[in-house]
Image (cartoon, rainbow, N blue to C red):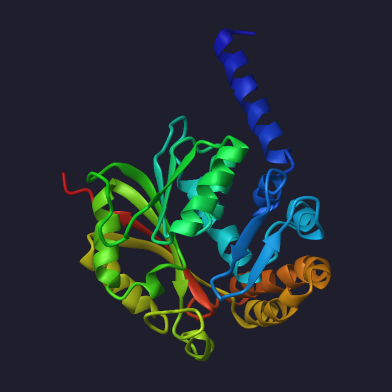
């Protein structure tokens, strides 16, 4: 066997092992961090809970991950997109805009990304995310910063992530302009945000939204304004996902019921994607959108 063949087979073997390696559930990383100290969490819809060391909540996070249907439906699509877009054999710089408690930043750092920066306006959340990152020894950094005035040079990030943040920003066009500025030419923005629907109108004030969601045309116009090309957009949380989210949200008062019902409800939420593919329902609108946009190469 030649050296070239040996390297080829070794690479194939490594990829096969990686493919079948059990992956911790999304958000399970917080359960690991809770081994060091108690952690206070709060969802975007105002639900607060404390994860104490050696508690049912910690065990639930380790086994189930974050039991929030909306977050997990988004995360499934966003993390998959980011991994697909990741340059091979490189160390891409990733910016997590509006990172909150740093769930995505911590997850991506744990999954092999070596240059992750999370920013948010909330100092307490940045403090919590930074502490978790240090406790777990993960290669990610966190800073208090405004998405409309990012403290970075232009053209420095390969990937920007912005999940459920845009609808909270009064001047969303300015924020997207800033994100586009710091992403390098041909760099990618992975974004999730709420769609215009009766459900988002009902929860707009409770979640502190600056607007009641976006249409496809709205997002396309914002991308064009910021010098980005919309490459893909898909809805999440259609009929089954919306139902699963509503039930899941009602159960947040019981940690036990939340953990026991999460995966059945998550599976129910995933039916939307199957139905969309089978029936080719490409123009449907759900709770929100998952969007991939690429910065134009003007050089």
In the depicted view, which residue is nearer to us: 87 or 38? 38
In the depicted view, which residue is nearer to us: 39 or 179? 39
Decide: is 96 above or below 274. Answer: above
Q: Residue furthest left?
A: 299
x and y, in percent, of residue 213 in the image:
42, 81
- Residue for point 59% across, 76% down: 237
Q: Quadrant of the C terminus?
A: top left
Q: Is residue 273 left or right of residue 177?
A: right
Q: Is residue 44 left or right of residue 19?
A: left
Q: Is residue 217 left or right of residue 1?
A: left
- Residue for point 32% across, 59% down: 146
Q: Is residue 114 left or right of residue 46?
A: left
Decide: is 161 above or below 20. Answer: below
Q: Residue furthest top?
A: 2
Q: Is residue 238 visible?
A: yes
Q: Is residue 108 visible?
A: no
- Residue for point 79% across, 74% down: 254
- Residue for point 42% across, 67% down: 165
x and y, in percent, of residue 143 in the image:
39, 49
Among the 4 quarters of the image, the one containing residue 26: bottom right
């Amino acid at each position: 066997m030649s050296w070239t063949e040996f390297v080829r087979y070794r690479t194939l073997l490594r990829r096969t092992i990686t493919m079948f390696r059990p992956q911790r559930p999304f958000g399970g990383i917080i359960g690991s961090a809770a081994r060091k100290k108690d952690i206070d969490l709060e969802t975007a819809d105002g639900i607060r809970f404390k994860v104490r060391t050696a508690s049912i909540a910690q065990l639930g996070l380790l086994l189930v991950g974050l039991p929030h249907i909306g977050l997990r439906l988004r995360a499934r699509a966003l993390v998959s997109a980011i991994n697909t877009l990741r340059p091979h054999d490189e160390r891409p710089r990733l910016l997590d805009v509006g990172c909150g408690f740093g769930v995505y930043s911590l997850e991506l750092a744990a999954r092999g990304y070596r240059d992750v920066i999370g920013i948010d306006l909330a100092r307490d959340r940045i403090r919590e995310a930074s502490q978790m990152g240090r406790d777990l020894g993960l290669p990610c950094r966190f800073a208090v910063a405004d998405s409309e005035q990012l403290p970075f040079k232009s053209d420095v990030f390969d990937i920007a992530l912005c999940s459920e943040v845009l609808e909270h920003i009064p001047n969303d066009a300015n924020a997207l302009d800033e994100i586009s500025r710091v992403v390098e030419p041909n760099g990618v923005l992975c974004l999730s945000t709420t769609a215009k629907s009766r459900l988002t109108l009902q929860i707009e004030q409770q979640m502190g939204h600056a607007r009641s969601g976006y249409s496809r045309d709205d997002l396309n116009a914002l991308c064009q304004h910021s010098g980005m090309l919309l490459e893909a957009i898909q809805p999440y949380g259609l009929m089954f996902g919306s139902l699963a989210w509503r039930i899941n949200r009602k159960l947040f008062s019981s940690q036990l019921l939340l953990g026991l019902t999460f995966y059945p409800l998550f599976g129910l939420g995933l039916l939307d994607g199957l139905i969309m593919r089978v029936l080719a329902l490409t123009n449907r609108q759900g709770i929100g959108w998952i969007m991939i946009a690429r910065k134009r190469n003007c050089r």
